[in-house]
Image (cartoon, helix red, strand yellow):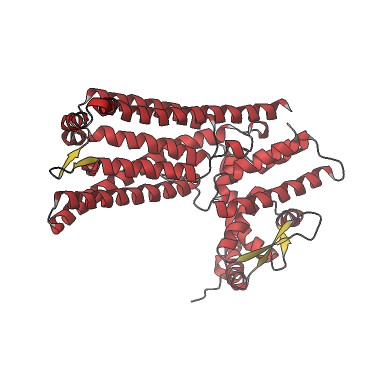
Amino acid sequence: MNYDEVVSGLILELRRGTLILLVLNQLKKPMYGYNLVKQLEESGIPIEANTLYPLMRRLESQGLLKSEWETGGAKPRKYYALTEDGSIVLERVKKHWYEFSENVNLLLEGREDEIQRND
Amino acid sequence: MKYNEMIERYIYAVTKNLTPKTRSDVAKELHSIISDMLDERCGDVLPTEHDVRVVLTELGKPAELSEKYNPDGGKYLIGGLYYTKYKLVLKIVLISVAFGMSLAGIITTIMEQNIWYIALAQWFGTVFSGLTFAFAFVTILFSFFYHKGIKIDTQSDSPDDLPPVPNEKTTISRWQPILGIVISVVFVVVFLVAPQIFCVLFTENGEFITVFNLETIRSTWYLIIFFAVLGIIRESVKLIDGRYTRRVMNVSIVTDLLSAALSFWWLTNKKIINPEFVRRMTELFIGEDEAIGRVFANFQYLFLGVIVFALVLDVITAIIKSLKYAENSENGIMHA
């Protein structure tokens, strides 16, 4: 069995949704794409530019992000920022993330008896 | 190749199949990101060709990046890059078929003085089968292009092998193939449904003499449709590539040759011209005007001549412009 291949496939699946959450969160204040790539990289979350750019564009078409070309500087840059709808969505997804990841961690550590049920 | 040229080619390869709305924005964004990546890599030092190559390779194959930018991307019958063009061609073909059939229907009703509701019912029948055929054909054609095109697109992996950005002379504007499709579809539909539209009215007894032998036309319907099919294939390839590529040249040569052969066979072997028309026209021009009468006696050759002339013109344009475009790309590589 090629472990590396299977593991990287699973990690890719795990990362996909998480990255969207992070991108939305970081864009509470406007940033251009490459800036965000660097920032995430420095925080230990490597993301490739060719993944981030199309992703931001998709989130923009969903109305979660908005963009604006900043032509004042040395070179034109497209700044992305969270919209109002985006911030509402972000808060709800974040809430879900906290609960979900906590339960996942408890399960992984074999402490299922500590899981608080919402019902 | 100068490194700017390499960047331009890369961006063109990524954006060429995106919708016109997003194309320029994505191009601008890619410029900005490539420039950022080069700055990051080289700092204040001027980037070399090698740096550009590394950065572009890091960004990934143009076709893959293009798929990511395309909201329709993925594995489908007709996938992302081709889907927008499929929709466009489908729209044009369906509208042309409906228009041509309505035109033919009106002509037939007037000329044959049919009862209108019977004519309407017949018209619905023909339009329905015509549209169904057109839909199926365009869908199959584009699904073929898509599955074949994917292979062609991903062949060029290295930034050095990318095709050049076409200049004005080697670009094909969208309107040219669109017009080509409309004309060939409308013509063929009218010809097929109401060939009696081409007729001469003899005033002395008020009768219409048709130019073509209606029975022969009806019995060779598959040849006429094949003629339109060849036209749609040729124009669709032009629409997809948007520039005179080798593929456009090859497809033009093959389809034009086939069309010419088809017209030649159709017009010379089949009794396509109404003998009554030839007889009456030659009778009409006797004496001094005999020369004119002879033209009508050989009417199918005149018709053939016009078709072949148009096809030859198309082939020559395609060859000259494609060679010019190929020359551009070789020049680009020679600079390297």
Q: Is residue B176 visible?
A: yes
Residue A61 image offset from top left, x and y in percent: 56, 61
Occupied quadrant, residue A86: bottom right
Q: Name the residue: 20% across, 38% down.
A: B210
- Decide if residue B227 is on the left or right side of residue B161: left
Occupied quadrant, residue B327: top right
Q: Is residue B39 above or below residue B118?
A: above
Occupied quadrant, residue B199: top left
Residue B63 image offset from top left, x and y in percent: 57, 41
Q: Quadrant of the C terminus of chain B?
A: top right
Residue B183 image offset from top left, x and y in percent: 38, 43
Is B57 or A68 nearer to us in this picture? A68
Residue A53 image offset from top left, x and y in percent: 64, 53
Q: Name the residue: 75% across, 59% down.
A: A71
- Decide if residue B235 is on the left or right side of residue B210: right
Is B136 or B203 nearer to us in this picture? B203
Q: Quadrant of the N terminus of chain B?
A: top right
Is A84 or B290 nearer to us in this picture? B290
